[in-house]
Amino acid sequence: MIHNRLCLVIGLVLALTTVAGAQEKTHLIGTGELRSLSALSEKVVLRGAGQLQQLVITGHHANGGIRDLTRQVKYRTLDPQVATIDAHGLVTALKNGTTEILAEVDGKAVKIGVTVEGADREQPINFTNEIVPLFSKLGCNSGACHGKSTGQNGFRLSLLGFEPRIDFEALTREARGRRIIPSAPEVSLLLQKPTGLMPHGGGRRLSVDSRDYQTLLRWIRAGAPFGNDTDPKVVGLTVAPAQRLAPSKSALQITVTALLSDGSRRDVTADAEYSSNNPEIAAVAEGGLVETLDVPGDGAIMVRYLGHVGVFRATVPQGAPLEKYTFPKPANFIDGHVHAKLKQLGLPPSALCSDSEFLRRASLDITGTLPTAKEAEKFLADTDPGKREKLVDSLLDRPAYASYFALKWGDILRNKRDGIVGVGGKQERTHALHGWIRDSLAANKPYDQFVREILTATGDFSGPKAQPPVGWYNVLRTPEALVDDTAQVFLGTRIQCAQCHHHPYEKWSQDDYWGLAAFFARVQLVNPKNPVQAKKGNAKANANANDTRLVLVSEGRVTGPHGKSYAKPRPLDGKELDVPGSDDPRQKLVDWMVRADNPYFARAIANRYWAHFFGRGIVDMPDDMRVSNPPSNEPLLDALAQDFIDHKFDLKHLIRTICASTTYQMSSLPNEHNHKDKQNHARFYPRRLPAEVLFDAFDQVTGASVKFVSTKGAGSAKTPATRAIELPDEAVKTPLLMAFGKPDRSSACECERSGAATLNQSLYLIGSTELHNKLKDKSGRAAQLATDTRPVSEKVREIYFWVYARPPVAEELQTVERFLNAGGNRKEAYEDVLWALLNTKEFLFNH
Amino acid sequence: MFNLFSESSRNCEGVSRRSFLRLGTLGVGALTLPDLLRLRAQDRATSDTAVILLWMDGGPSQFETYDPKPDAPAEYRGPYQTIRTNVPGLDLCETLPLHAQSADKFAVIRSVAHRESGHGSAVKNLNTGYPHPPGTNEGTFLYPGVGAIVAKAREQERRGLPHYVCVPTAGIFKGDVGGGAYLGSAYDPFAANPGDGAGALIPPADLSLSRLQNRRALLSSLDRMRRDVDTSGMMEGMDAFTRQAFEMVTGPRAREALDLSREPAAIRNRYGASVERAQPWGQSCLLARRLVEAGVSFVGIGMGGWDDHGEALVQNLPRRARIYDIAVTALIEDLHARGLDRKVLVLAWGEFGRTPRINRGGRDHWPSSMSVMLAGGGMRMGQAIGSTNARGERPQDRPLHPNDVLATVYRHLGIDHTRAFVNPQGRPIPLLPNGEPIAELL
């Protein structure tokens, strides 16, 4: 009887495997009756006893869509002597032979052929391939633990296992050999500590009955070998499936396969490390089980194994009925790509924002400035259907545009007074660089030219022959600093980890890093009064206060770790370049960057500007573009970058394109289906005003004004700015600017500008002298309104236009009028009203 | 795990667990939930401890304070005499006569040395545990100060007052002893001066309590933007901070803690009220004591002016040392009298020591040897740890690094100094790169 049924099932499976091989509709989530099952691999080969293989079983449903059923099916091995399988679909090889595994549910089934080879002989164990990954997986070699440069409690491992030889020595030679005791493997510290059998500062990381414990034990029993140089090495990683549409709150299994140098493949799903880039969308557990949550969008899972990185993307749809909603008519290609994504996810967009919201939003984003009350009245009354576009054009023509974006560029180019070595002339230098940035932006200098002038600058920092863009080299005085900032600012990638060790989340090695550094090897800072200095040299930190001229010498090299010397520059993913002494290698670097096929340059700036206008990059963080951090909408990023290249790196064009899209003009008010969206732009995401913008907005609304004078220097060196967005460097600080996150410019990361909410901000708003003085200014708004003879309602209306660029609604008008008419000191009452409005979220946020 | 959770939310005043979860993700580089839980697990047992830091800005001379060298040649010994104290073997300079009567209640470390001879780099190294590159002379701390770390580690404990407060009477403010740096401005110190700077705990004098209450009422009726436009949780987070801030500013707890007039005149005078003019250090110490009693974890007090080059060593130091002597001994004795000497650790130090050989009447910067004073913290008092050589040039016995002192401070605060926070670049930075708690004190 049993036998018969089995035959029947197998027959059914055979009939169905061909169906599973046909085109599957991976863009649809399976609903309705389950029609068939398929396996990701229908034949698997395992080499060596104990080798694992993770299966993935997919269900095909009546609607043509799919679902992961790896954990729903029941598994059975036809010959359990050859291999076993657990309830999660993990196969373990036992002895040579072939068998079949049957996965079935709801009367459907699929069969997987299993072959085990080499189980009859002891597989040689390789330290690098099998032991080191355990240290990564268990967290032993992390930067917070034994992986930090000083180790932990006397035991040091190389950070994230990039130096297996050093780890091997540490384990087998140090601590009087107590870490590894081949004669009594179980009492080795390597096993006693992480299992908690001996006190371990890092706690219990490993259980005695785990497979990882058995692997370590097996290695020690084998005499703790390092392995042979001829043993195959891991040369790559594949993650399968690479992408899946998955319903919210569901689980799905991924597999990770290592490609070895001998051409073989090995399943390492159980040993790889996983982490989620978007933990609100999809979480991941050890063993590659991905669980989606209830936020729609793309959840990227980063997979790491032995220095190799892979990525899986779970796309979680909202699945709302879109027919009830109208999508706005696309204004340009941005909307096309955004709408396509929204439609894929079933995520209906919000309505378009009001004129008041658009005026306020565009003014704040382009010029860092609130519209005036008059401007707002006029814009609202304007009946021209093209008025939003015209507004953007007009904002881009204002000096405040250049000032505001010069502030942004000043941050990431680190135009920093405190970073300048030496005494005197510091303001002169930061002001010169600031002025040059501002003028370049005002003139709409093509971005490629802007970058070239910075990167290839030579000449004097200050004085009559000053070359302002040299100022970028003020703070960046080593090839390392230059590489870090070049990569992060202009290529959108954080390479600094690779200075000292292979990048943990990226493909970059130390050779990649130092190949870039070699572009700067011939940069030298010299003393203009004594210009006869080395004609060639080893570029290094230069902290001589008198060296205020940047020159290019004819030869130079940089020295990386372990004393390795790099003379030939090499662009990322490129070949070493021979640059004659008469040429500037930095020109070659820019040539490579600005090529139309450069995969980093245009995408980095397009993404950075996108983040400026939407509060989040298409790749987020905007300067952390890497394989393991994919864009939320790849076609959109590609198109935006291509459009930027096609328009000859025109920054104003980029801004116009972004602001013209209906995506930028979406309301922040959610509808019933898109309130959880955080990455697909189904609505506008509000963000708190940046520190300087807030400062100026307070001034504008309260009618107070401030003249910034420098805290240092005198006479002509005093800071001329009258608005916070015009501040050229980081040196001028006020309590507001500090509390609301004006960066110190100590890194090129935009993340240094904090938009977070804090308790001191709230205390500031309630009780700071600075804001109090603005409110009670003798000639300020409150003072004027207190003596103004117009009816109260008119005055309240004006206040609302100053604060929100809109008139008050009846209820608001009534509340404020009642407060103002309650008697007492009239000026103080107006101060209190202004204070309350300045503390509302509608004011504090750009929305 | 869940036990821990409910423990932490029980300490939360006014912040729901939901907003706590969201608040944790507001700032870049915020702790992950597991981080927080781990921190809580480690810190729970000792989280009522506090530290008062007396930052002797300028770098006090060890010879004229805690490490006199009566037997050295005159050009090293300097112009002052040595006095005995109530602890045999713990002799001090005559500039600190009141210290002599309380020596059983503090400990001196004489053998600390480091390499930073500039004010800018030394102040950062000693307050953060990390050397700073040249060029970061003025404001920029690249690493968080100890107080900021404490504020981060204890951020889920709401006590009606911030965890990290600086008493800015002597010009100390953000950055002077370390702000939040990469942890974010949320961990900068709060200022205990009226309307003074960000995070002022006391509003300006002409802003009455009733006006503050009017404003709060008006705000709540006008602030009507729908909170669901923001899924980051930031608007709700701000609302929670606003509630907390109003409670601090208008509620009794902070107001009372900050109100020195509640102290009897005798106490205020013991803290030197009558002798202080330009340097109200004693009243700052009294304020610090009130603040730690009210639940503040870390109070920084600036006691600047110790940069005694040239004639200052004779002309200015005695007057300054007298005010310091009164303030510090009053604080130490008061903490003892109130049974706070286990809960509160007092640490007094500056950037570095001074040059052993007198130069133009004064002493210059000397990081190769310096003295540190510690009191309370339930530690072993009445001892001198380590020594310098005959001319006070360098450590002789038990050479120690400033980070050993900081590791001792973290231990008192129940914070594992080897744990790491992740900076915005994703790199884990241990609280200290080196250093171990000083065994003699424990």
Image: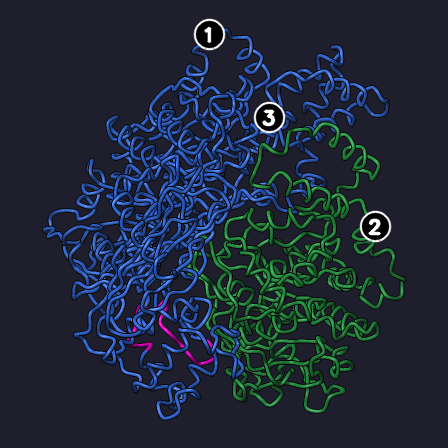
Chain colours: A blue, B green
Q: Of discs 3 and 2, which sits in the foreground?
A: 2
Of A553 and A363, nearer the camera is: A363
Task: Tell which subunit mark 3 falls on.
Answer: A
Instruction: Please report, as a chain letter, where disc 1 is located.
Output: A
Disc 3 is placed on an element classified as helix
The reply to whether discs 3 and 2 touch (Cβ–Cβ < 8 Å) is: no
The residue under label 2 is which amino acid type? Answer: Pro
| Depth check, front residue: B166 or A50 | A50
Q: On screen, A327 above or below B197?
A: above
What residue span does the magenta drawing correspond to?
A: A152-167
Residue drawn at the location 26% of the way across and 76% of the way down: A126
Q: Position of residue B237 (x, y in %)?
A: 64, 43
Which amino acid is tagged 1? Asp
Q: Which residue is mark 1?
A: A384
Is the residue marked by circle 2 packed among few (<14), some (14-19), or many (20+) residues within 10 Å?
few
Of badges 2 and 1, the one in the foreground is: 1
Q: Label for residue A700?
A: 3
Q: Label 1, label 3: how many angstroms apart (C-alpha)?
A: 27 Å
Residue drawn at 78 percent across, 26 percent down? A829
- Residue B262 placement (x, y as % from top left): 87, 57
Figure check: A516 above or below B389? above
